[in-house]
Amino acid sequence: MFACTACGTLLSPEAWVPEEWELLELRKAGPSGALFRARHRLTDEAVDLLSLAGVRTDTPDFVAWFRQEIRFLRPLTSPGIVRLLYAGVHAGNPWLALEPAPARTLGDLLDARPRP
């Protein structure tokens, strides 16, 4: 169980993601989903796992849109873009496994800049 970072409500996210992912830490949560640090149980690969809640996945329009987004995002590589590694739908909840992002905010990056 994890507590929502926005409202404190207890979440049971294990039902949102496939069992091959172990959820290690809740990074952020809100009404539209949650972002976790996770580990693939077989490969030991660390990812940021984004689980979307409240999205209707049972419509042909959603399925087409989700597939299109995955096909578009998967090949993108750039130093400024977090790479999409895996994606799927589990128990009606879409999820994305992303390259782990540094736990820094824009403010952290701005503070680290050299000052004139």
Image (cartoon, helix red, strand yellow):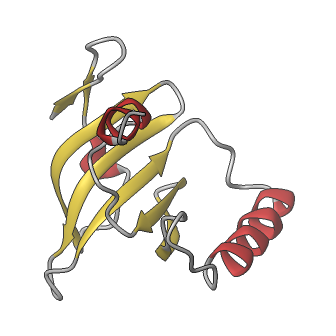
**In this orientation, which residue lies closer to the viewer: 36 or 17?**
36
Q: Is residue 6 left or right of residue 79?
A: left
Residue pushed farthest top? Answer: 7
Quadrant of the rendered structure where residue 49 is?
A: bottom left
Rendered location of residue 80, percent (x, y): 53, 63
Q: Give above or below for 65 relative to 67.
A: above
Residue pushed farthest front? Answer: 116
Q: Is residue 75 left or right of residue 53?
A: right
Rendered location of residue 20, percent (x, y): 24, 74
For the C terminus, the image quarter is: top left
Q: Give above or below for 52 relative to 2.
A: below
Q: Give above or below for 21 relative to 3.
A: below
**In this orientation, which residue lies closer to the viewer: 59 or 46?**
46
User: Residue sitting at 50 percent across and 71 percent down?
Assistant: 79
Rendered location of residue 75, percent (x, y): 63, 85
Quadrant of the rendered structure where residue 71 is?
A: bottom right
User: Residue sitting at 21 percent across and 79 percent down?
Assistant: 45
Q: Is residue 111 left or right of residue 70?
A: left
Rendered location of residue 87, percent (x, y): 51, 72
User: Residue sitting at 26 percent across and 46 percent down?
Assistant: 103
How many marks the image carries: the answer is: 0
For the N terminus, the image quarter is: top left
